[in-house]
Image: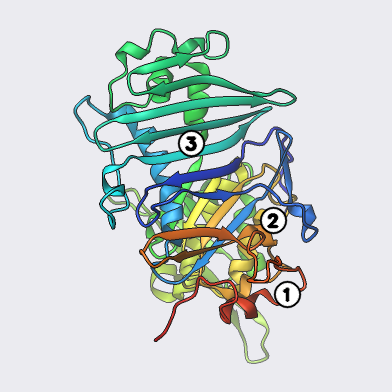
Amino acid sequence: MRLRHIKNKSMLVNFTFKNFRSFRDEATLSLEAASIQELAGAVVKSCDEDLLPVAVMYGANSSGKSNVLKALKAMRDVLLNSVKLNPKDYLDADRFCLDLVSVEEPTSFEIQFTIGNSKYRYGFDYTPETIVAEWLYEKRVGEREFELFLRSGDEYRISKTRFAEGLGKQSVTPANRLFVSLVAQLNGTVSQLILDWFSNIEYMSGMDDKDYAGKTLKMIMYRQEGDEAVVRFFEQTNLGFHGIEVNARLDDKHSLDSKTIHNIFNEEGTVVGQRGFPTESMESEGTKKMIEIAGPIFDVIIKGKILIVDELDAKLHPFLTRKIISLFMDKNTNPKGAQLIFATHDTNLLNLQYLRRDQIWFTEKDKTEASELYSLVEFRYDSGNKVRNDRNIEKDYINGRYGAIPFMS
């Protein structure tokens, strides 16, 4: 399965956040490739950056791995919903509330990403009532990082050459409104690029996938460029059926029904026909989940977007989870540099044949119930040594060598 190769990929470089849900202190999720040898062919070049197509998070229940994903979703939502706010509306803030200081401090988000030949760094600090600070920087290939604008309370510093679209817009920006959002609404070119990039972040819950089935069925039914990959994917995963039949249901919701097509055999085991079974009532929960999430996964790959999935492995056989990861890791099936960020408990993936050390992340809470985030490639033993690439990562993790596991008293 090979999709058309596209240059100038737009990709996430890293994401830093502070004072959000269980994370009191600053934490950074990086998709920058470290200088290691395993699976070097999976590294993607974007705007002179060596980036990773996949990042996975492990940790005990309630350790904070889901909150890393929700932090990235929250930044996206605050920005994209900013346009809808009235001046007196509250912002959606979810601060660390287990100490007397953080609950009164702003939440902070900062993200770095590539668009074409530029790397942008955008962030903001905010409380439910106001945007405390906001900033945007650009670094073009071969140049230093350049400040496009810096906002601190009611004061602004705006570049006349690189962000002229923002000049004169300061006075009409409400305290609870993000400046990038307002300038984009007023036809700002650079600011609209920023919003468009954030619009390409898709969030999915692996525990509740029913809402995603429609996209899969529409891709099968209406077959546009690239959608054939969905059909071939089901052929390769050997889920026990040989096709999916999709029909429009004539009701007020204009929804779709599907049937999985199975072979009928005679006494000698020869195929003599086929029969369709209603997917919803006759297929396993795992098969239904694969059908439900296949459409969103391939939509992300075809368009070069970012997919965030909490509990990707829920209801799925480990082979299927590995198959999904391989779609993103292989440049033939992922030419646009789509990225997958997910949380899981599937330790079968802790194998350096499937993932690199810099793609594996752990979350753990300290004695004050604050979450910490760290990667396998930066982890050090008490001796000060790093984790070698010949270790049995799965066995070591289960034995607690990297932390991030439940403590059973």
Residue type at mark 2 is: Met
Residue type at mark 1 is: Arg
Q: What's the coloring here?
A: rainbow
Residue type at mark 3 is: Phe
Q: CA distance from mark 3 to mark 2?
A: 22 Å
Q: CA distance from mark 3 to mark 1?
A: 37 Å
Residue drawn at x 63%, y 51% as measured from the top left: 228
Quadrant for the C terminus in the image: bottom left
How crowded is the residue under tag 3: few (<14 C-alpha within 10 Å), some, or many (20+)?
Answer: many
Q: Secondary structure at mark 3?
A: helix
Give the vertical position of 205 relative to 219 (above or below): below
Contact, CB < 8 Å: mark 3 with mark 1? no
Going by the picture, which residue comes out furthest to the bottom?
267
Q: Secondary structure at mark 1?
A: loop
Residue pointed to by mark 3 = 198
Disc marking residue 298 = none
Viewer-side residue, 311 vs 366: 366
Q: Earlier in the sequence, mark 2 or mark 1?
A: 2
Viewer-side residue, 195 vs 374: 374
Residue drawn at x 52%, y 44% as measured from the top left: 15
Quadrant for the N terminus in the image: bottom right
For discs 3 and 1, the disc positioned in front in the rendered view: 1
Residue 91's spot in the image, x, y percent? 27, 37
Residue pointed to by mark 2 = 329
The quarter of the picture where residue 63 lies is: bottom left
Viewer-side residue, 4 vs 270: 4
Residue pointed to by mark 1 = 391
Give the vertical position of 186 relative to 140 (above or below): above
Residue 382's spot in the image, x, y percent? 63, 71
Q: CA distance from mark 2 to mark 1?
A: 22 Å
